[in-house]
Image: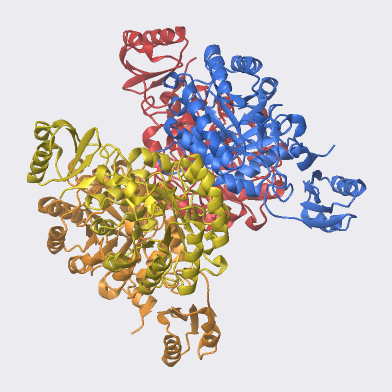
Chain colours: A orange, B yellow, C blue, D red
Amino acid sequence: MIVDVSAAAGEAAIEGIRARVEASGGRTRVSRTAESIAIACTGLGAAHAHAIAELPGVRSVRTGGPAHILAGRAFCQIPTLVRAGDDPRTWFGGTGFAVIAGPCSVEGRDMLMSTADEIHAAGAGLLRGGAFKPRTSPYAFQGLGQEALVLLAEARSRTGMPVVTEVLDVRHLDLVAAHADVLQIGARNMQNFSLLAEVGRVQRPVLLKRGPSATISELLGAAEYILAHGNSDVILCERGIRSFDTATRNTLDVAAIPVLKRETHLPVIVDPSHAAGRADIVTALSLSAAAAGADGLIIEVHPDPASALSDGPQSLTPESFRTLMTVLEPVVQAVGRWLAPPPLVRRDATPDVRRIGMEAAA
Amino acid sequence: MIVDVSAAAGEAAIEGIRARVEASGGRTRVSRTAESIAIACTGLGAAHAHAIAELPGVRSVRTGGPAHILAGRAFCQIPTLVRAGDDPRTWFGGTGFAVIAGPCSVEGRDMLMSTADEIHAAGAGLLRGGAFKPRTSPYAFQGLGQEALVLLAEARSRTGMPVVTEVLDVRHLDLVAAHADVLQIGARNMQNFSLLAEVGRVQRPVLLKRGPSATISELLGAAEYILAHGNSDVILCERGIRSFDTATRNTLDVAAIPVLKRETHLPVIVDPSHAAGRADIVTALSLSAAAAGADGLIIEVHPDPASALSDGPQSLTPESFRTLMTVLEPVVQAVGRWLAPPPLVRRDATPDVRRIGMEAAA
Amino acid sequence: MIVDVSAAAGEAAIEGIRARVEASGGRTRVSRTAESIAIACTGLGAAHAHAIAELPGVRSVRTGGPAHILAGRAFCQIPTLVRAGDDPRTWFGGTGFAVIAGPCSVEGRDMLMSTADEIHAAGAGLLRGGAFKPRTSPYAFQGLGQEALVLLAEARSRTGMPVVTEVLDVRHLDLVAAHADVLQIGARNMQNFSLLAEVGRVQRPVLLKRGPSATISELLGAAEYILAHGNSDVILCERGIRSFDTATRNTLDVAAIPVLKRETHLPVIVDPSHAAGRADIVTALSLSAAAAGADGLIIEVHPDPASALSDGPQSLTPESFRTLMTVLEPVVQAVGRWLAPPPLVRRDATPDVRRIGMEAAA
Amino acid sequence: MIVDVSAAAGEAAIEGIRARVEASGGRTRVSRTAESIAIACTGLGAAHAHAIAELPGVRSVRTGGPAHILAGRAFCQIPTLVRAGDDPRTWFGGTGFAVIAGPCSVEGRDMLMSTADEIHAAGAGLLRGGAFKPRTSPYAFQGLGQEALVLLAEARSRTGMPVVTEVLDVRHLDLVAAHADVLQIGARNMQNFSLLAEVGRVQRPVLLKRGPSATISELLGAAEYILAHGNSDVILCERGIRSFDTATRNTLDVAAIPVLKRETHLPVIVDPSHAAGRADIVTALSLSAAAAGADGLIIEVHPDPASALSDGPQSLTPESFRTLMTVLEPVVQAVGRWLAPPPLVRRDATPDVRRIGMEAAA
């Protein structure tokens, strides 16, 4: 249920509505813009709508509708800006375009540090690297685990880039959150609802990948789990869906970008590497994602793809990544955004869009 | 790697091979038939194959191949019989045809007991019922949890039917295993590899549902996780895949049954309810599954589908379920199996096919 | 628009309705059962519904709804029986189960005659064989054309089996119709609307294959083209749809059988050969189709699959086909139908269900 | 089979090879670049390869491989430029970016002329408009036929824009070719091989749309039919494939663009309107296609989408189309191409890439 409140209504009115909802066992979240205030109420039957509509300051009450209340545009009309660090290149959902890059798996210290240095020099904003790897076979390389997390933290110290890594298991969450800046939920875990609830309780941005056969509506339902448990910093990621064509590993659903942009205020990025499954078209897919309105990319880069322990065929070399960044910039600018931050985009000069956009109950 | 050993080789030869593999950090599992002995070796590089081929009793060593070694026919040629109880109607993979039935969710005591009584009278062998429910929306009914587990255990006492219920979270595993006879891994968790590893450590049959966009090979990879962690009692379940057609909720991939039967020794059952998403064709799909060679079915039955908290449109009434069982029996017999066990199939009279088929290291 | 007429209304009332519709530029088709009479009116705007509802004998007028009026159950509640010959084994949609078999392509006289003899001896009712072949590559074998048609006619004379062959091109229609008993529209031409219209003008049964990505609704729309142009003898054929899984060539949508049976009065058969793309599971798919309620099968049989010019991997040998027929019979009987016609099913003893079911304007 | 000939080999050598192939019943096509000469030989068994390899001037002979010989990069390494008129905005496959626009169906004179004027003013290079419409239902609007063709020709006279329209039936081909500049083969007819062969015999550019479940390889096979029958001017069109997601009508397979660009020398355009099925994301998809390397677009524009007889929900208004062209230009330029031709691109100044690229036997 979403309660629209008059912008002229004072804090007392808002508190009154919150108190009424919470007294009935519901929970509230408030979204404010200059013109309007919306209060999302969850865990409350539609039967309460009538009584709430009578409270002071309430303009209207909307019930029903999609499963994604907090994730929806109807609740929060301003785009959410998710910041993984102070550098504007690590912000998702604003006027910049953020690029995450790095190896599929952290395979060792040397390969990670050299990759981190190279992608940083090429303009990437964040470093990705798998510590715990979900693999189709139990006999495949499962990642270096904690050792990889320590290496990622070292790479962050060295380059200043925040670290994105996947969390597979609720029991690893504290460990991963202690080392990583952005918690990735992989495509196979998009509907691991226990895990979604747990990352919803952590104050750390979450990169949520779309499952290979998940509808857009299901992706938003998964995001809603995270939001509903208290974490507002969710970045959605389109990474290709399953189709019949085998020319690519998955089929990049580029239309998901504008569709999501209409449905939700959350930032949307694209993983062209997993979509393609082959390095030779990663650049073309990256440009297409930027042109379609994506807020960023996550790209696999490996110093020697042929020897990679996982996902070698789809990994760019550092050199190809540099080329990609070069051809990407004019496309990003053509759609009115920037890749390397212009001087005037400084942390203290940028309004905190997210906090204006959505605010948790105290 | 699979090591074929001469049937004439004594235990000493087998022990010698095991010792060699384990000394190199690998693990072994032995499968025996009257004619041959196969030793599956996991966690061992192919570089060891040459040395192992020289050991006494070894006929040949096969490396490479699919990710599913323990699940594969090459390792175990005899079908695995998974027994959820003493009653032959609860056995999967033999000459019988097992039927699991019950509500999507346990919604309360009365509905569960009446459904259990009705399906038991109609000839079902096992009772299903959801305690922890994975739901697309965080605001949908999430199941009664522990309360439902207690009710399921009561229904088992009352009817004698073993209980099948889903486990969603590694942290619930002990609790669920304390009440349930078969642990279900839902379609959304088919590649939740942490959870697969944990149910692999429990000595309790596991019902593993195919993910809606999982290939057959990925399903076998998921089963391999469970087998590789020590649990040999895995029942595979085809429950429909995602396709473009919206006439049904999913597309029942009936061909998966004979394909799986060729690839693996594990039993294969079908969930026609989730495949159809509509009650009116559940019976037709059930018959088609039986005719295609399935080892059983799992069917949703609710005393009042219109008021069900989840999956109402696809639930049969108890009366429709009785009709289904009636028309199912001649089809099951037409393919040379039985639905109600003939008198001669008694526990003590049936060879323990599974133990012959596959044997864990002591 | 479908006009329901009281069974008590005389022919004058029916003629009055027809005259009214035709005067407004529409066309009519009448369907009669013991209890009711339905008149389908096509080519008429919904604006006429009101005036028609006032005519004598009219009980109700239904407008809107699906694109398939003539194909729908709402128009004709009795199953249509399509007869390709006098032998009850060539009837589709009654209490029997018809089997069409033969090579993918007619490759020569010897292979065709020997295959025809073998499948006839095994109990097949009709002979299939491609004369004009649609091939993905222009350089692949395109069929023997007219020469094949002559050979097929010879095989018919020899065995008595009616002949099913594909027509690819409107310009070949007269030629094919001069030799074949059933005109097949291939999956790739399911929405070749010019061709559908032309076979609709021929008085010859049409076997309409579902396109690999056609919805059930689109298949019925394609059938409607044929029916609307005057040909009531349409047999629908499910032959597998495209999905992501590569274990089989296509995914047999077995649920399409009961769904179609609810939507339409037309007979429904299954092509397990193209669905599977591999011979080893054709039998299992055949049994599953029969159990799900199909009215028949179309199966590829080749004397030497390894040397076949097309579709070898999915072709049965004559010997495998005999085995299939043997195991098929008990399943067909288990669902209350017959494979070899019982003595009492003779042409003169069987009601002409189709003519009762649906009747064209004189 | 592709025969690589030394660039130094004279015409006599080429004629010798041609004569040898044709004497064996094969056909040849020659492709020349500055460095190399390739002769594609079709209709010839691989058994001839050895003898041909011995002929003067032959460097190597490649047999086997994909079904698309003439369409492949291996045969013709230079992109084919297909020209629908003299204006560089009507050229596909060069350094420009061509835009086709217009209504789904020609519904009448006024709507066509006003749309043509508006899109011309906005910078479109070609006019689309359906005369013969393939429709799922036989009762839906089937197009104005010949009347529409005459109106399209009038719109061409008025604006100078060449006309693109679909041909559905081999019997209409002469009629359509007499009025249209580019013959469109619709998605449903992509594997109507009779029709492909016939348009292959016409000297008129063909716009070949990918079928909704066609693989990229099948699309190239369909193009090969046209090329093999003598017509080298084929424009490929990605228009969305069928997937499980219903947020869009089809799923735009944007990766098909770079994949096709690697496989074939033919130009590739995108139809964002049919991919989206909804007007609100057509612009985003258009930009993504341009960024991914497409050679052009085909877009549905209607003066009043709400009243369109077909495809209204996906049609842009003329005003939205103007906006699209405005935001498209910087993206097209960002990838190094032009939308409005720069002054120096004049017909006489541009090399005839196609004729260099591929040349039919005299």
Q: Nearer the viewer, residue C99 or D124?
A: C99
Count of numbered labels shown in the rendering: 0
Question: In the image, residue C84 lies at what x, y percent?
Answer: 68, 28
**Percent x, y of residue A271:** 32, 53
Image coords of residue B231 (percent x, y) = 25, 53
Observer-nearest of B128 and C248: B128
- Note whether residue A353 is visible: yes
Query: What residue is rendered at 27% in x and 52% in y?
Result: B226
Q: Residue furthest bottom?
A: A12
Image location of residue A99, percent across then percent down: 28, 57
> Which residue is situated farthest in the right direction here?
C12
Q: Nearer the viewer, residue C114 or D194?
A: C114
**Vertical comparison of B127 with A281: above or below:** below
Q: Would residue D131 be seen by someone viewing this image from the given angle?
A: no
Q: Quadrant of the C terminus of chain C?
A: top right
Q: Is residue D226 above or below residue D93?
A: above
Left or right of D158 in this view: A151:
left
Can you tell which quarter of the image residue C354 is in? Answer: top right
Nearest the viewer among A111 and C236 is C236
Please tell me whether residue D155 is drawn above or below residue B225 in the rendered image: above
